Amino acid sequence: MSDDSKTIQRRSFLKQSAAAAGAVAVAGTAGISQARRSKTIRWKMVTTWPKNFPGLGTGANTLAKLIGEMSGGRIEVKVYGAKELVGAFEVFDAVSRGTAQMGHGAAYYWKGKHPATQFFAAVPFGLTAQEMNGWLYHGGGMELWQKLYDRFGLIPSAIGNTGVQMGGWFNKEIKSVEDLKGLKMRIPGLGGEVLKRAGGTPVSLPGGEIFQALQSGSIDATEWVGPYNDLAFGIYKAAKFYYYPGWHEPGTTLECIINQEAFNALPKELQIIVTNACKVANQDMLSDFTARNNAALQTLVSTHGVTMRTFPDGVLKRLKQLSDDVVAEIAANDPISQEIYSSYKKFRDQAVSWHAVSEQAYLNARAL
Ligand code: CA
């Protein structure tokens, strides 16, 4: 079967399943006149996070609440934690086929669907949160993201950002690239591929399974997000050293995916509300992480006695070389990967030039 006929078949399936999902429910009951009877659109949002998980799960709740409030109650979104309706890594398929109308996760979890999804979550040594938002909203990134997800019947949105993450938790010190050899580490996306090139073994695990895997020794090391989220999982109880910087995730964008058929069925004004609720939630999560990471880092160090370490420059330089290779190879996969890579790289080059004389120069000056 050709790719085109697969796509057509899939579209047809999506139409049927979105209709079957019956996103529109009549809210009015006996006692309410026909004229006043209003239709409430009920959507399900499946997520890759434990229910109400700080920052990420609560970010999904914020989005649902915003859509409800901004639409004056015309849309109600019910949020499901991982495994409540579908498993964490089943979110993409569940929304694509219309089992749920929305999903909340991170695009690099779907690299098996298409490797270029990873450009829309995090690229090692790539864009920061501020730069990602610049690329997505005003640098052509969002249009490319939509183009990539169109084949899956999905509409993507940026829905939060963690800011620069931490490098991860280790039970041995990383003094040279040799120390990464044979290391079994939970690290998703392109960062995982880079670790593999450095001789390690990357493992992809949902957040909720990390602590137990590290404590039981089924993985040697892990990254998760940063102080705020890592403290919430208690990862410090299972590892000695907390490394920085998070070279592999310099500003990870979280995503909301919406089933195209469900979105297209909305009146225009509700489509605008959903789109803009996503923008508000996107900024809100970054602000949440910025505020809470500061406090959580102090708790980890002062209360829990966590030992902080930086990756040596030699290790970071080698990881950067390997990252450049990995990213360029993904670009060579197919035309859309090349198109996304070219756009991303052009924006990154410009951001490096501008931020050398703005953000970076200022942060250096502040540290004098
Ligand atoms: Ca991470």
Image (spheres, grey):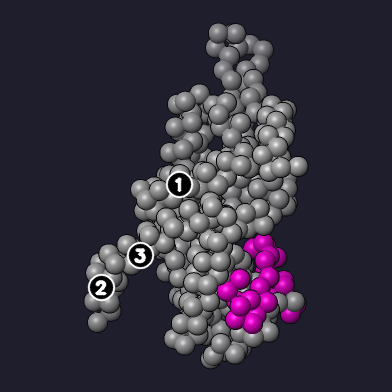
Secondary structure type for disc 2: helix
Specify whether 358 is left or right of 61: left
- Neighbour class for label 3 at 10 Å: few (<14), some, many (≥20)? few
Residue 367 horizontal/vertical position (percent): 28, 79
* Residues in magenta, as a range: 192-217
Dot 1 corresponds to which residue? Answer: 142
Looking at the image, which residue is at 56% across and 84% down?
Answer: 241
CA distance separating discs 3 and 1: 18 Å
Quarter of the image where one finds residue 177: bottom right
Disc 3 residue type (three-letter): Asp
**Residue 349 disc label:** 3
Q: Is residue 314 in view?
A: yes
**Residue at figure coordinates x 65%, y 48% from the top left:** 92
Q: Earlier in the sequence, mark 1 or mark 2?
A: 1
> Sequence order check: which comes first, mark 3 or mark 2?
3
Looking at the image, which residue is at 49% across and 36% down? Answer: 274
Q: How far across and how far down the image is residue 185, in percent?
A: 65, 76
Mark 2 residue type? Ala
Q: Which amino acid does label 1 sit on?
A: Met
Q: Main secondary structure of the magenta part?
A: helix
**Front-most of 11 and 228?**
11
> For this rendering, which residue is in front, 94 or 60?
94
What residue does disc 2 label? 361
Number of the front mark, 3 or 1 = 3
Q: Is mark 1 on a helix, strand or loop?
A: helix
* Real-space Cα separation, disc 3 to disc 2, in angstroms: 16 Å
Q: Which mark is residue 182?
A: none
Q: Nearest to the eye among marks 1 and 2: give it.
A: 1
Determine the residue positioned at 66% across, 16% down: 29
Q: Quadrant of the C terminus?
A: bottom left
- The Cα atoms of the two marked residues, 1 and 2, are separated by 29 Å
Q: Is residue 80 visible?
A: no
